[in-house]
Image (tube, rainbow, N blue to C red):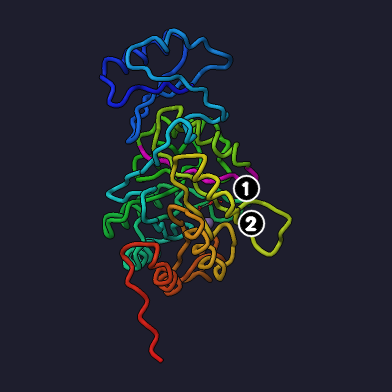
């Protein structure tokens, strides 16, 4: 349910509505907006008698939200959500590029990558300290040591960090260091983790589960918003299909669909989607063309020596080339030098 208030309502009128909602055993979520102020209501499992609310001062209308996801829907909040992290604005006009290694392996590898992706025009640094690996025998990440290295790379470059939190056990450690908490594809339906991240003051990058429908994806995001965290960024990272020529299939269709159904920013991860370095650049371009708010790509100084996901990692030169090719979409990138005949 959505309660529409008259433009610029008084704080008293909003407080009165919130109290009336709580008295019905429901939860009010005031949603300030450019075009209107509304109060989203969640917690109703059946029909609600809205008559007492309709009669309150400055209430213009009470609307039923038809989608199963509520706070994430554009029905509730028509204006785009812009997530601001260390001066970087995600979800507004010019798209962002997040880049860095799959895993933090050494200080040198991480710091060198961070410096180079920054020089190329990336606005955020990615890197895994705690890694969710398919095989228990694969490199599991440096853990807390990896977080320390990431923090140092941020200090040197000024790039805000995105790193994954793989479970509630390591939540505080990751939250203390990172600027954006990543919840990975394998954890998209880890509800205790989603609830914990929903209580955090740090923004969350939520990756789509490899077999999640759009509705499941948005309901996972709904956990975060319903716990009070409005700063959620969605990320399409490829889904399982019968196609066996790449690691996953980038569901580019979901980008415009998400942009129309939700106000949250949408990123695309062409690295995990394809599993192949040579596909990353064309897929990144496709993401921008489809209206994504940015891309997140894996970069390694020596991809052949990487401890995880080397096959899909761009080397430093390829990253610089990619950024020059994206200069139409992304700020801070020098235009490609004109070809001389
Ligand atoms: C990652 O980004 O490092 C990662 C593990 O991605 P995903 O959760 O999409 O597999
Ligand atoms: Mn990876």
Q: Is residue 1 above or below residue 139?
A: above
Q: Are the residues tagged 1 and 2 within 8 Å (C-beta)?
A: yes
Residue 120: quarter of image: bottom left
Q: Position of residue 171 (x, y in %)?
A: 43, 37
Q: Is residue 198 above or below residue 333?
A: above
Q: Which mark is residue 210?
A: 1
- The structure residue drawn at horizontal position 60% and vertical position 37%, both measured from the top left corner, is 216
In terms of sequence position, does the residue under pointer 1 or pointer 2 come before the other? 1
- The structure residue drawn at horizontal position 31% and vertical position 67%, both measured from the top left corner, is 119
Between the residue at mark 1 and the residue at mark 2, the CA separation in whole angstroms equals: 8 Å
Q: Which mark is residue 130?
A: none
Residue 76: quarter of image: top left
- The structure residue drawn at horizontal position 44% and vertical position 70%, both measured from the top left corner, is 322
The total of numbered circles placed on residues is 2
Q: Position of residue 229 (x, y in %)?
A: 40, 32
Identify the residue at the far bottom of this view: 341
Packing grade of label 2 (10 A; few <14, some 14-19, many >=20) is many
Q: Which residues are magenta?
A: 202-212
In this rendered view, identify the residue nearer to me: 27 or 20: 20
Q: Is mark 1 within 8 Å of ligand 1?
A: yes
**Is residue 299 visible in the rendered structure shown here?**
yes
**Is residue 111 visible in the rendered structure shown here?**
no
In this rendered view, identify the residue nearer to me: 46 or 298: 46
- The structure residue drawn at horizontal position 53% and vertical position 71%, both measured from the top left corner, is 304
Circle 2 residue: 248
Q: Looking at the magenta stretch, what is its main secondary structure?
A: loop
In this rendered view, identify the residue nearer to me: 121 or 105: 121
């Amino acid at each position: 349910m959505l309660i529409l208030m008259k433009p610029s309502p008084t704080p008293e009128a909003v407080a009165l509505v919130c109290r009336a909602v709580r008295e019905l055993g429901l939860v009010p979520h005031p949603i300030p907006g450019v075009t209107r102020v509304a109060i989203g209501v969640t917690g109703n499992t059946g029909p609600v008698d809205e008559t007492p609310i309709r009669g309150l001062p400055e209430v213009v209308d009470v609307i039923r939200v038809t989608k199963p996801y509520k706070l994430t829907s554009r029905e509730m909040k028509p204006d785009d959500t812009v997530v601001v992290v260390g001066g970087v604005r995600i979800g507004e006009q010019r798209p962002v590029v997040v880049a860095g290694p799959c895993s933090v392996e050494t200080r040198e590898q991480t710091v060198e990558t961070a410096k180079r992706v920054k020089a190329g025009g990336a606005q955020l640094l990615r890197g895994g300290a705690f890694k969710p690996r398919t095989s228990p025998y694969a490199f599991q990440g440096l853990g807390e040591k990896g977080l320390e290295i990431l923090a140092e790379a941020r200090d040197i470059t000024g790039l805000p960090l995105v790193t994954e939190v793989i479970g509630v056990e390591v939540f505080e450690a990751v939250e203390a260091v990172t600027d954006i908490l990543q919840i990975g594809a394998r954890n998209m339906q880890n509800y205790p983790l989603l609830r914990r991240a929903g209580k955090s003051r740090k923004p969350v990058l939520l990756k789509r589960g490899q077999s999640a429908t759009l509705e499941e994806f948005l309901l996972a995001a709904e956990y975060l918003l319903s716990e009070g965290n409005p700063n959620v960024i969605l990320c399409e990272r490829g889904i399982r299909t019968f196609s066996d020529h790449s690691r996953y299939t980038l569901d580019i269709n979901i980008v415009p669909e998400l942009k129309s159904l939700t106000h949250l920013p949408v990123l695309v991860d062409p690295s995990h989607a394809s599993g192949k370095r040579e596909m990353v650049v064309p897929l990144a371009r496709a993401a921008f063309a489809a209206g994504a708010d940015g891309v997140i790509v894996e970069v390694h100084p020596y991809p052949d020596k990487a401890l995880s996901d080397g096959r899909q990692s761009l080397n430093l030169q390829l990253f610089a080339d990619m950024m020059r090719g994206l200069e139409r979409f992304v700020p801070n990138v020098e235009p490609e030098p004109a070809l001389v005949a």
